[in-house]
Image (spheres, rainbow, N blue to C red):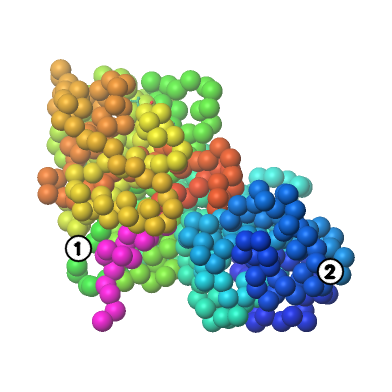
Amino acid sequence: MTDVLSPEILPFDADALAGRTGRITILVDGTEPAHASARRIDRLTKGAVTRLMTSEAWAKVKPGESLDLTWPAGLAAEAVQVLRLPRKADVATARKAGAAIARTKAASLVLLENHPRQSDLILGLLLRAYDFDLYKSGETTPRGAVTLMVADVEGAKVAVASGNALAQGIFFTRDLVNEPANVLTTVEFAHRLTGLRDLGVHVEVFDEEELERLGMRLLLGVGIGSECPTKMVVMRWNGGVAGEAPFALVGKGVCFDTGGISIKPAGGMEEMTMDMGGAGVVAGVMKTLALRGAKANVVGLVGIVENMPDGRAQRPGDIVKSMKGDTVEVINTDAEGRLVLADVLWYAQETFKPKGIINLATLTGAIIVALGAEHAGVFSNNDDLCGAFLKAAGSEGEGAWRMPMAQGHDDKLKSRLADMMNVGGREGGATIAAQFLKRFVKDDMPWVHLDIAGVTLSKGDTATAPKGATGWGVLALNRLIADAYEMKET
Ligand code: BES
Ligand code: MN
Ligand code: ZN
């Protein structure tokens, strides 16, 4: 488990600067050192900060970005990071600025003084201080300590505490997504989720026998070619009114997706360790809700399974009965995510009668073709819930774009032999998958499907995460629950 940074918080002390070793970060507004602390550093370095800020190089530095003054005369520090953050910066820029501090692992002193975006900067710093180097022998250096010097010590402590709850949830998601499939087996995944019990989350693990008894054959069918047993894990956080219907989060947890008998090409197949990303986000949100003691009832349900080819594996053409009762002709065993979700969605509705459902899944390559890595695909049967989600995602800077649903795409799922097929052609593939899921959502149930295939793993560093698992969705879903489902203090 990657640890979250816990910065030391001190009141501003001008006398502590000259002798300080390591890095020092100062905030500047635009073209001059704005805060007293930055001016102090400028004086100690005999105007080096001012010279840097009148240079040609500085003209290219955008809000949220920085330049280093290395080995500045007059200071013991090895570098002064001059970080541009206007006082009127928006949330995303402040987070990016915070992240810029954590891009190196070096110990640093950050002079925040009284910036109005202090808490967003702190969150960005915490989120970027993430390294997944568990399997690198020899070459890893631990992260140095970070000290924040601020005017408002109490405010900074609150920001660090709330940032910590978010970062712990997001790091939980990122760790799960980054783990290889020989480590994060279905059994290990379920085991890690039971760790949430320590935080007061009620966690139930269903084994194959119980899933069989519940009639969840679509979910089970995906896993029969694997040595790893299929699981469903139900996590309940009851911080709201006792007995009130919960909001439900449902996640696809395919620990590895070979495609099954409809096997995928070898190139890039190693990325399919991230095919449990939807379940990973559900787990991360549950962790954050518990850590911050959210006053809401939320149930998280994940189908955990491995899709492998084998002598016993599901074949193309197999007809399987869902928990709902509808039969599915499995034309392509690589369209397995929708089979997993269909049964878990049905179980969620039958068991919890939730107020609404959001499911997350790395469901289709087609959504990557449509939207790339900037936005997740959002599909919904309910404008209110969909609008609330898009607003939450927007305010947290997590890209999300609504996609259409259409009867014509549903028609393509018609099967000669069964109630439906699991695929319906390449054109509009992400919408066809969404239409398949919709068949397992009751008519009056507010529902949003998030196809996160493009946003789960990043090919390079993002604003607040290094290359690899992003944790996309934890911030947005936590915000949605806080704004729309949490009991308000009266
Ligand atoms: N897990 C994949 C989708 C995926 C692709 C996620 C690339 C992340 C990156 C999913 O199970 C899948 O294989 N979908 C098929 C569906 C098709 C057979 C209808 C796809 O998108 O090709
Ligand atoms: Mn697949
Ligand atoms: Zn898959």
| Position of residue 331 measured from the top left corner of the image (x, y, whole percent) | 28, 21
Give me the residue at 31% from left, 27% from top: 429
Looking at the picture, which amino acid does disc 2 mark?
Lys
Question: Which mark is on residue 245?
Answer: 1
Give me the residue at 52% from left, 22% from top: 266
Any part of residue 13 in sight: yes
Question: Which mark is on residue 46?
Answer: 2
Looking at the picture, which amino acid does disc 1 mark?
Ala
Give me the residue at 20% from left, 23% from top: 412
How many tags in the picture? 2
Q: Secondary structure at mark 2?
A: loop
**Within the magenta stretch, is there residue 63?**
no
Any part of residue 220 in sight: no
Q: Which residues are magenta?
A: 475-490
| Position of residue 339 measured from the top left corner of the image (x, y, whole percent) | 28, 35
Is the residue 24 above or below the residue 406 in the image? below
Q: Secondary structure at mark 1?
A: loop
Q: Name the quadrant of the C terminus.
A: bottom left
Give me the residue at 44% from left, 34% from top: 372
